[in-house]
Amino acid sequence: MVGSKGLSCSCQHNRSDAMHTDHELRSERPLRLEKAHAKVIECLSGTAWITAYAQFEDCVLRSGERYTIPNDGLVLVEAVGSGHIRVHGTAAPRPALLRWLNLALPHTLHIRNT
């Protein structure tokens, strides 16, 4: 178990800080992520296979690609061969998207600039 954030795995940890955790992955040794809604998985090297709770299709990431965890259910991340991933904190909404949504749906979206 990694910290108290509900992240658990059977892999080697290369680096960890408050904003992200790096993981070395191997085939047949999946990383288990629980209660990680909106966290971002970034593939640093190799190929990562992601299976997420309640998602009809798995996701395959290659180096440089990212995946945002859609809910708090179990997520399994496994390497195809070997690889490295980084799990980031909650994904921040993109300002351009927020501006577009505010224009498209001004009565339903309230944005505070702080």
Image (cartoon, rainbow, N blue to C red):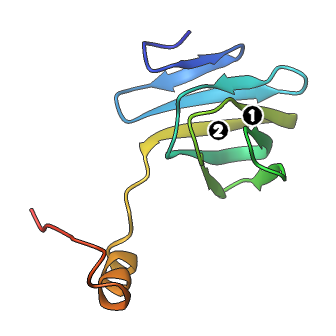
Image height check: is 47 above or below 65?
above
Vertical comparison of 111 with 83: above or below:
below
Residue on which the image places disc 2 = 85
Q: Does residue 35 appear left or right of residue 110 in this picture?
A: right
Crowding at dot 2, Cα within 10 Å, few <14 / some 14-19 / many 20+, comes out as many
Check if mark 2's residue and mark 1's residue have beta carbons within 8 Å.
yes
Q: Quadrant of residue 71?
A: top right
Q: Secondary structure at mark 1?
A: strand
The numbered dot on residue 77 is: 1
Seen as rendered, the residue at the extreme left is 114
N-term-proximal mark, 2 vs 1: 1
State whether residue 13 is above or below residue 107. Answer: above
The secondary element bearing badge 2 is classed as strand
Residue drawn at x 34%, y 28% as measured from the top left? 18
- Of 14 and 94, nearer the camera is 94
Return the x and y of residue 107 as percentages of the image width and height. Answer: 26, 82
Residue at the location (80% across, 32% down)? 78
- Amino acid type assigned to the residue bearing label 1 in the image: Val
Q: Identify which amino acid the numbered label 2 is placed on.
A: Ile
